Amino acid sequence: MAPRLWSCFRKKHLAGCRNPDSDRQVGEEVLVAEGEGPVLVEMFTSQGCAASPSADLVLSRLGRGDFQLAVPVVLLAFHVDYWDYVGWKDPFGSSQWTVRQKAYVEALGLDTLFTPQVVVQGQAHLSGNDDIALVSAITSAPRFPALTFQATFSRPTSICLEVTLNGALGMKVDNLGADVMVALYENGLVTDCPRGENKGRLLSNDYVVRKLEKLCTVTDHPAKKIISGTVSFSLWDSFNSTRCGLAVFVQSSSHQIFGSQNFHLPHDI
């Protein structure tokens, strides 16, 4: 049976976001790993939307390998905040993620924000509940050389995580430039929802983006030249490194994704 398509729609929504730069250093050339890298899959979702929990499950199943994809994926869930007024404020919702979704709405020529929405490689979008269409979009998405970053993690204080990245993009960046972004996400989140459209439900969420920072912006950058930099994340009270991961991705000014990479956090960090 084909999946039922359910979505919550909302007109375009503006909000502010902060995306601070960090120091950038460009050095010697390195060897670039051959082969195509993973596909970035971004889910825009909300605990305040009745249609989102089933899509959140699809994302979790993707991460478990239930769909037996031949294509590796990097998964991120951005919880937007524009459904908070319905009766339940999503504890992971942020106006910053709403702004990110709005940028995709404009780049893809859409006229509404909606949840659950999936964006694949920054170039194709679909309902997060349509698992058949999602698998097809991932399989047919453009692939780019694998990023070759190495990551070093440190905790200078109990409330701060620093990540130093060193590696190459694997493809040339032209004079239009691209941003190297770093997302810190959390898995295994369970929320008892007492109000709103999902009242009485136990909501499970994986790949929830908790922080997003920019490592650097590159312009006219050779494929094999090293990029080095450090990003700092302020941590939340319940931070547990065993539940968290790190995603690095390269995004152009037109919001297309040109490479991504995933890291597990050390358990003893």
Image (cartoon, rainbow, N blue to C red):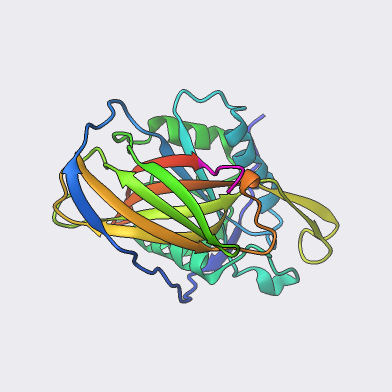
Residue 30 vs residue 196: left or right?
Answer: left
Instruction: Give the residue drawn at x 61%, y 65%.
Output: 93
Q: Quadrant of residue 231?
A: bottom left
Along the viewing direction, whichever of 221 and 49 lies nearer the viewer: 221
**Residue 87 appears in the rendering:** yes
Q: Which residues are magenta?
A: 264-269
Residue 202 vs residue 150: left or right?
Answer: right
Position in image of residue 16 (x %, y %): 46, 76
Residue 265 shown in magenta:
yes
Instruction: Give the residue drawn at x 33%, y 38%.
Output: 147
Along the viewing direction, whichever of 247 and 251 lies nearer the viewer: 247
Instruction: Give the residue drawn at x 61%, y 48%.
Output: 241
Q: Quadrant of residue 239?
A: bottom right
Residue 171 vs residue 258: left or right?
Answer: left
Residue 192 higher or lower than 205, as above or below: below
Residue 89 higher or lower than 227, as above or below: below
Residue 65 shown in magenta:
no
Instruction: Give the residue drawn at x 44%, y 36%.
Output: 137
Position in image of residue 29 (x %, y %): 17, 40
Along the viewing direction, whichever of 238 and 97 lies nearer the viewer: 238
**Residue 172 appears in the rendering:** no
Looking at the figure, which quarter contains the N terminus?
top right
Residue 164 higher or lower than 28, as above or below: below
Position in image of residue 255 (x %, y %): 33, 55
Exactly how many numbered labels are in the figure? 0
Q: Quadrant of residue 242?
A: top right
Q: Main secondary structure of the magenta part?
A: loop
Looking at this view, name the residue that lies furthest to the front: 156
Position in image of residue 60 (x %, y %): 63, 39
